[in-house]
């Protein structure tokens, strides 16, 4: 069974994707950007959106197994470390950071996450 989770964001309908899909024993959360002017604000905001999707799927950050970070400037990743460390706590997932362009220059970080889905 597949469960699709929408956050109601404008890009979901425009582009044709869901915020998260629960399938195959995992919660696959789409690349998520946040609001705010700084990379730290955007990181916190993106994590809030991701956390809400995980909750709707019956999961949490403690269930995360993989996370990918995309930033247009790799130097801006370090200021996010304390925020990410606090979010994942004692349950850090495997992680990758990639420096790349994002869909809009106003975005400083995009976060994509995979978590274990709750047993059904």
Image (cartoon, rainbow, N blue to C red):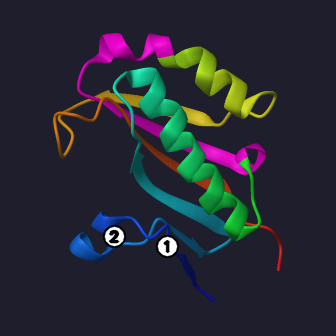
Q: Which residues are magenta?
A: 61-79
Whether residue 52 appears in this view of the structure is yes
Whether residue 96 appears in this view of the structure is no
Indicate the secondary structure of the residue bearing disc 2: helix
Location of residue 113 in the rendering, given as x and y in whole percent from the top left corner = 53, 49
Q: In the figure, 113 relative to 68: above or below?
A: below
On screen, residue 91 versus residue 28, left or right, reads right
Residue visible at 33% across and 70% down? 12
Location of residue 26 in the rendering, given as x and y in whole percent from the top left corner = 64, 65
On screen, residue 103 versus residue 77, left or right, reads left
Considering the image in quadrants, where does the N terminus appear?
A: bottom right
Query: Along the line of sight, which residue is nearer the eye, 82 or 45?
Result: 45
Considering the image in quadrants, where does the C terminus appear?
A: bottom right
Location of residue 22 in the rendering, given as x and y in whole percent from the top left corner = 60, 73
Q: Name the residue that disc number 2 marks.
A: 12
Mark 2 touches mark 1? (CB < 8 Å): yes
Indicate the secondary structure of the residue bearing disc 1: loop
Residue visible at 59% across and 76% down? 23
């Amino acid at each position: 069974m597949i469960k699709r989770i929408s956050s109601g964001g404008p890009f979901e309908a425009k582009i044709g994707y869901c915020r998260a899909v629960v399938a195959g024993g995992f919660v696959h959360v789409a690349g998520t950007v946040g609001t705010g002017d700084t990379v730290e604000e955007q990181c916190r905001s993106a994590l809030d959106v991701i956390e809400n999707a995980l909750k709707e799927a019956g999961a949490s950050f403690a269930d995360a197994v993989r996370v990918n970070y995309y930033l247009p400037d790799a130097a801006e990743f370090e200021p996010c470390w304390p925020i990410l460390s606090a979010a994942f706590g004692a349950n850090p997932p495997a992680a990758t950071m990639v420096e790349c362009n994002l869909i809009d220059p106003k975005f400083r970080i995009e976060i994509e996450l995979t978590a274990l889905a709750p047993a059904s």
